[in-house]
Image (tube, helix red, strand yellow):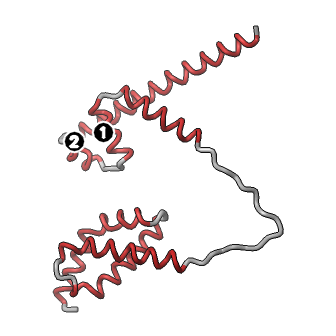
C-alpha cells in the first residue's frame, strides 16, 4: 500500500473509531470482545484498503467485515460441555419484577414536562453526552444539565410519594385483616 493510502487509512480510523466501536458493541455483548472484533476488522480492512474504490462506503465495508468476523468466531467457539451423572437444576428466571419496575418507570415519566422527559431519555436511555443532547434538542449544555437535575429530582419525589402511598395501603390492609 502506498504511503498516501496508509495515511488516509490512519485518518479514517482516527475520525471513525468511536462510531465503529459502537457498531462492534452492538454485535458482541462484552466490551473487550467488541474491541478485539474492531481491531480484527481494521486489520483485515487495512489489507484491502486500496481495493475500496469509494471510501465513503468504508463504514459499510467495515461493518460487513465485523459481522463476518463475529460469525467466524461464533462458528469456531468451543463448546464446553462436561458430562455429569446428575443433571443440573433448571432454573427459570422470573422477570416479573423487572417488568414491574419498567412499567412503574414508564408511568412516573408521565409526570415530567415534555422537555424534561426528552432530556432524561436522551441522557440516560440513549446515553448521549450533555453536548450531544444539547445539540439534538437545540438548547445549551447548561440548560440540559439544569433540566436534567430538576427532572431527576421530580422523579425521586414521585417515587417517594408512591412508596409512601403503597406503605399506607399495605398498613391499612394489615389492620383490616387483624380485625
Q: Residue furthest top?
A: 179
In this rendering, is residue 84 above or below 88? below
Q: Quadrant of the N terminus?
A: bottom left
Q: Quadrant of the C terminus?
A: top right
Q: Would residue 152 be found to the left or right of residue 162 on screen?
A: left
Residue with the mark numbered 1: 119
Q: Residue at x 45, y 34 (%)?
A: 105
- Residue 7, labelled with which disc? none
Categorize mark 2 by other alpha carbons within 10 Å: few (<14), some (14-19), many (20+).
Answer: some
Q: Would residue 10 be found to the left or right of residue 107 on screen?
A: left
As measured in the structure, the alpha-carbon distance from the residue carrying label 1 to the one carrying label 2 is: 8 Å
Residue with the mark numbered 2: 137
In this rendering, is residue 155 above or below 44? above
Element at label 2:
helix
Q: Residue at x 25, y 50 (%)?
A: 132
Q: Quadrant of residue 10?
A: bottom left
How many callouts does the rendering have? 2
Asked whether the beta carbons under mark 1 and mark 2 sit within 8 Å of each other, the answer is yes
Categorize mark 1 by other alpha carbons within 10 Å: few (<14), some (14-19), many (20+).
Answer: many
Q: Residue at x 39, y 72 (%)?
A: 67
Image coords of residue 96 (percent x, y): 59, 40
Element at label 1:
helix
Q: Residue furthest right?
A: 85
Q: Quadrant of residue 111?
A: top left
Image coords of residue 9 (percent x, y): 23, 80
Q: Residue at x 17, y 82 (%)?
A: 53
For the residue pair 14 and 177, the one nearer the viewer reads as 177
* First-in-chain label (1 vs 2): 1
Image coords of residue 148 (percent x, y): 33, 36
Q: Quadrant of residue 6?
A: bottom left
Image coords of residue 81 (percent x, y): 69, 73
Amino acid at each position: 500500500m502506498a504511503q498516501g493510502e496508509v495515511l488516509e487509512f490512519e485518518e479514517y480510523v482516527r475520525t471513525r473509531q468511536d462510531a465503529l466501536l459502537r457498531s462492534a458493541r452492538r454485535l458482541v455483548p462484552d466490551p473487550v470482545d467488541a474491541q478485539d472484533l474492531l481491531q480484527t476488522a481494521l486489520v483485515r480492512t487495512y489489507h484491502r484498503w486500496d481495493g475500496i474504490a469509494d471510501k465513503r462506503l468504508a463504514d459499510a465495508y467495515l461493518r460487513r467485515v465485523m459481522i463476518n468476523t463475529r460469525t467466524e468466531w461464533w462458528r469456531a467457539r468451543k463448546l464446553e460441555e462436561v458430562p455429569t451423572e446428575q443433571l443440573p437444576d433448571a432454573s427459570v428466571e422470573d422477570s416479573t419484577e423487572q417488568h414491574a419496575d419498567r412499567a412503574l418507570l414508564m408511568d412516573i415519566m408521565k409526570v415530567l414536562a415534555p422537555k424534561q422527559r426528552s432530556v432524561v431519555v436522551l441522557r440516560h436511555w440513549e446515553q448521549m453526552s450533555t453536548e450531544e443532547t444539547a445539540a439534538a434538542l437545540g438548547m445549551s449544555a447548561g440548560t440540559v444539565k439544569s433540566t436534567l437535575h430538576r427532572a431527576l429530582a421530580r422523579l425521586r419525589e414521585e417515587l417517594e410519594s408512591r412508596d409512601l402511598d403503597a406503605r399506607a395501603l399495605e398498613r391499612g390492609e394489615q389492620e383490616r385483616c387483624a380485625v
